[in-house]
Image: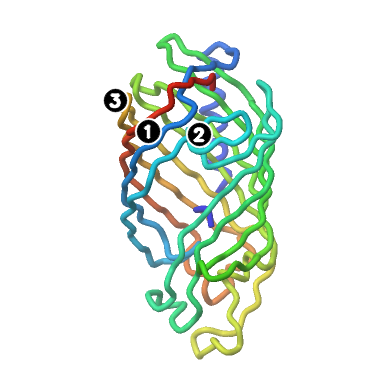
């Protein structure tokens, strides 16, 4: 589940966007020639809570193939997760989006001790992305402000079977600045409130009778507001082949529907990630993106 805020953060983001629009001139969409596909290797370290609101954290080291594909319909990587584009122009994009979250063992968590493990989660569903503004600055940097309306079905898997856990609705405001502070730096900030159906909440916060105990009462979660994520990320283009990235993901669960669950622990979470991507091969064919 995505690392999942508040009026102050939203106001700060809107204020920043307003400041940029005053300092910049509105620009036409900027298209850059890029390889159709890239292959490489990526590695990094990720620190995140066991589950949303958990006070306990896990650290993961990752080493994965790096794949980018910039097709007319299928897009993988290149500033976002995988998506299938059904229609787009300079002002909007209708596409199919994907998301995923790592599993977590309950035996390593005090509140979930003796309960079933939380499996790997993946989500799929449509998204409608609107361009709220594209800007160019006197220092040759450029930026864009977007609103994305995302609805996804959520599933879990232990890679032996798949279970459906309901649906999520996650509107997102995202500001991305290319060449921020330095020509090789790309910075992004996003604000993402999340609502989910009962089954999604229940996956994290239900306590069945068989797992209840003195300090963990039976609890049935309700659907509704889940929390809000305020995320920051930066990518440093070391060379044409190498990129270093860092991310800070914060989530605010104030006012969340199931704060009274015995498994709900903290109204604030933060996660951190740092990694390196190395592109080994790329296509000779180029596309404008």
The structure's colour scheme is rainbow
Against 128, is 99 above or below?
Answer: below
Against 58, is 229 above or below?
Answer: above
Which is more toward the observer, 14 or 200? 200
Provide the secondary structure element on which disc 1 rests.
Answer: strand
* Nearer the camera: disc 3 or disc 2: 2
Residue positioned most to the left: 238
Provide the secondary structure element on which disc 3 rests.
Answer: loop
Disc 1 vs disc 3: Cβ atoms closer than 8 Å? no
Which residue position holds label 2? 69
Residue 94 spot, x, y in % from top left: 69, 35
Which residue position holds label 1? 235
Q: Is residue 4 visible?
A: no
Is 43 situated left or right of 4 in this image? left
Residue positioned most to the top: 138
Image point (46%, 65%), residue name? 103
Instruction: Tell me the distance, in whole angstroms, between the alpha carbons under discs 2 and 1.
Output: 18 Å
**Numbered circle sitting on residue 180:** none
- Neighbourhood count class around disc 3 (C-alpha, 10 Å): few under 14, some 14–19, many 20 upward: few
Provide the secondary structure element on which disc 2 rests.
Answer: strand
Residue positioned most to the front: 284
Find residue 150 and report its image quarter: top right
* Nearer the camera: disc 1 or disc 3: 3
Image point (53%, 71%), residue name? 160
Which residue position holds label 3? 239
| N-term mark: 3 or 2 | 2
Find residue 121 and report its image quarter: bottom right
């Amino acid at each position: 589940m995505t690392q999942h805020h508040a009026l102050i953060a939203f106001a700060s983001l809107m204020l920043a966007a307003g400041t940029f629009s005053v300092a910049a001139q509105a620009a036409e969409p900027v298209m850059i020639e890029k390889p159709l596909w890239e292959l490489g290797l990526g590695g990094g370290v990720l620190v995140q809570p066991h589950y949303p609101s958990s006070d306990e954290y896990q650290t993961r080291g990752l080493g994965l193939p790096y794949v980018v594909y910039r097709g007319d319909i299928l897009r993988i990587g290149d500033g976002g997760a995988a998506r299938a584009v059904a229609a787009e122009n300079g002002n909007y994009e209708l596409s199919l989006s994907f998301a995923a979250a790592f599993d977590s063992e309950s035996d390593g968590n005090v509140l979930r001790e003796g309960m079933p493990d939380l499996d790997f989660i993946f989500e799929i569903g449509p998204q409608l992305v609107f361009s709220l503004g594209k800007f160019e600055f006197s220092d040759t940097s450029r930026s864009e402000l977007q609103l994305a309306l995302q609805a996804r079905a959520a599933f879990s898997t232990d890679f032996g079977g798949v279970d459906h856990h309901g649906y999520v609705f996650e509107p997102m405001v995202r500001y991305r600045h290319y060449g921020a502070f330095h020509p090789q730096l790309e910075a992004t900030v996003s604000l993402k409130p999340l609502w989910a159906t009962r089954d999604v909440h229940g996956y994290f916060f239900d306590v069945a009778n068989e797992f209840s105990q003195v300090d963990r009462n039976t609890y049935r979660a309700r659907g509704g507001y889940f929390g809000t994520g305020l995320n920051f990320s930066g990518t440093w283009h070391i060379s044409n082949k190498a990129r270093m990235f860092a991310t800070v993901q914060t989530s605010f669960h104030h006012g969340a529907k199931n704060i009274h669950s015995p498994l709900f622990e903290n109204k604030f979470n933060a996660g951190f990630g740092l990694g390196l991507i190395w592109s080994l091969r790329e296509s000779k064919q180029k596309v404008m993106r």
